[in-house]
Amino acid sequence: MLIRQKQLATSWSFPSLDRWSIIALLIAGLALLPIAIILRMLLLPAPDVWQHLWATRLAEFLTNTVILLVGVGTGTVLLGTGLAWLVTAYRFPGQRLFDWALMLPMAVPSYVLAFVFMATFDYTGPVQKALRDWFGSSVWFPSIRSGGGAVFVMSLTLYPYVYLLTRAAFHEHALGTFEVARTLGATRLQAFFRVVLPMARPSLVAGLSLVLMEALTDVGTVRFLNFPTLSDGIFRIWHGMMDRDAALQSAAVLLLFAFAALLLERLTRGRARYVQEGSRGHGLVKVPLTGWRALMATLLCFFVLATAFLLPISQLILWSVYELQQRMPEGLLAVYWRHARATLMLAGTGAAISVLVAVLLAYGVHLSRSPITRLAARGAMLGYAIPGAVIGLGVLIPLAWLDHTLNDLTYQWWGVLPGLIFTGSITGLIYAYVVRFMAVAYSSVEASLEKVSPSIEAAARTLGASPVRVLFRIHLPLIRTGMLTGAVLVFVDVMKELPITLLLRPFGYDTLALWIWQNVAESLWGEAALPALTIVVTDLLVVGILIRSATLRFRAH
């Protein structure tokens, strides 16, 4: 009987956890806490809140969100896949330039392109003024401040996600299957749709999922173009109606949209793996286009590049130069540096802590190899798929509780009120940034860690070195490039982040992104230009890294 009880106790006991598994679980717990808090709102009965939401604007927010996701998803798939196939399979004037230049619109945040288009194409803008002068006051022009305008703007800035991944798939896997389809009598168009495109489906779906996540989290574009979605609705409810419960319930609905996007990506990709034997890396034999076909291909690529990148860059430069000439440069630069310092502080701190946490997590997975540690790492990565508004509220609630609890305790014990230590400082901002962007740093660090030769680590361990000593003496020097890349990626993401900063920033602590938000709200296009140009130029560093890595990979093949 005693043996039987011991067997039962053993069968129900938890697996032993080493220190690295415990660290991974702690990191995952902190990363999942904001998400769990918002999910909890779905379990709380709140019929009055839901009735109020449905009676006001929730239906509009839901409808607009669906329209935005469908429209942007369709637009980015058509643009990204079509352009990727065009520069991969055909040769035309400018093809080599467009091959990498079509990634440049990724450097322009959607909300920056939105306010440039507002100033250019709105009723009082130069384009419509010129059209009225030429054709009379009754001339029709589509409104940029609409759902169609939001879909158009976000499709132009987000299509590079699909373009980059499908272009890589076409380069790496298209040749053999394409040749087989051609030898069986298929035309180039039939071979593309029946063979090449299904082979590129995992990459296409991966790019589309990134697009949908970006569209879900966007606040600036839809606010500027007057097309309120769930993300924007959370801010309207929080700041306009001052209704905490309604904002949290709306955030829970938005979280369900994010989970639906993740589930769609998993179901669409499934477990399919497309493997091609032989002839990999030679690339497609490009068909030269001539005559009007070559002209149309060049014009199409140039139109996309000019509309999504050259136009906003040129306009931002002109506005910035004008502002510096017309206003007192010292005064403008003083305001600029104040916002820039705050941005650098947040972005630098967020990037450093994200990389530190990513190294601990990746090294823990590397050493432990246990399912629990891997599951914890996956859970910690979930924040990148969650909209910023959801994470912001999920962080604000526990930190506000900590502040009030701490103030109550210190007042009872010592009669002192320390104030809002967590919500009144940048602590909440940094926490939310790490939850949101840690996955970016982790991917880069993990990729570098996997390239370290196991024999080097084994030699150090046989000499008696502890895991911590091996980490500092061997792994960190070898993965510093991956750490630096991850830090740069997180730095840029934090620099242009808007929803989290709007919710959690301390009073008077404004970043460059918030400076853009405030100026655009007052139609001060010129004053928004300098911070916008700074963000775009910084984003170009990341795009340059992507272009360089893609170019090196294709050359290696």
Image (cartoon, helix red, strand yellow):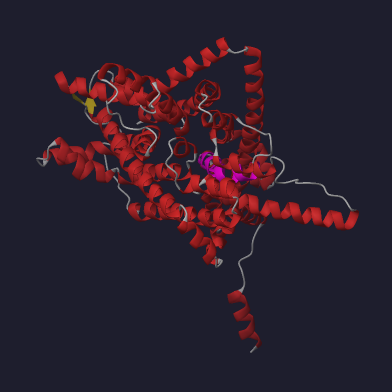
Position of the C terminus by quadrant: top left
Position of the N terminus by quadrant: bottom right
Front-most of residues 101 and 158: 158
Q: Is residue 21 above or below residue 458?
A: below
Name the residue: 29% across, 39% down.
Answer: 173
Q: Is residue 250 above or below residue 145?
A: below
Instruction: Count up the numbered dots.
Output: 0
- Quarter of the image for residue 137 reads top left
Residue that lies at the very extreme toward the top in this rendered image: 325
Kindly tell me whether residue 232 is visible in this rendering. yes
User: Which x, y percent locates residue 42?
Assistant: 52, 63
- Quarter of the image for residue 554 reads top left
Q: Main secondary structure of the magenta part?
A: helix
Kindly tell me whether residue 552 is visible in this rendering. no
Residue that lies at the very extreme toward the left in this rendered image: 185
Residue that lies at the very extreme toward the bottom in this rendered image: 1
Q: Is residue 74 left or right of residue 263?
A: left
User: Which x, y percent locates residue 4?
Assistant: 61, 85
Name the residue: 47% across, 41% down.
Answer: 218
Q: Is residue 124 above or below residue 359?
A: above
Front-most of residues 308 and 104: 308
The magenta span reads 430-447
Q: Is residue 76 left or right of residue 519?
A: left
User: Which x, y percent locates residue 213?
Assistant: 44, 45
Residue that lies at the very extreme toward the right in this rendered image: 414
Residue 65 belongs to the span the image colors magenta: no
User: Which x, y percent locates residue 377?
Assistant: 55, 52
Residue 443 belongs to the span the image colors magenta: yes
Front-most of residues 116 and 86: 116
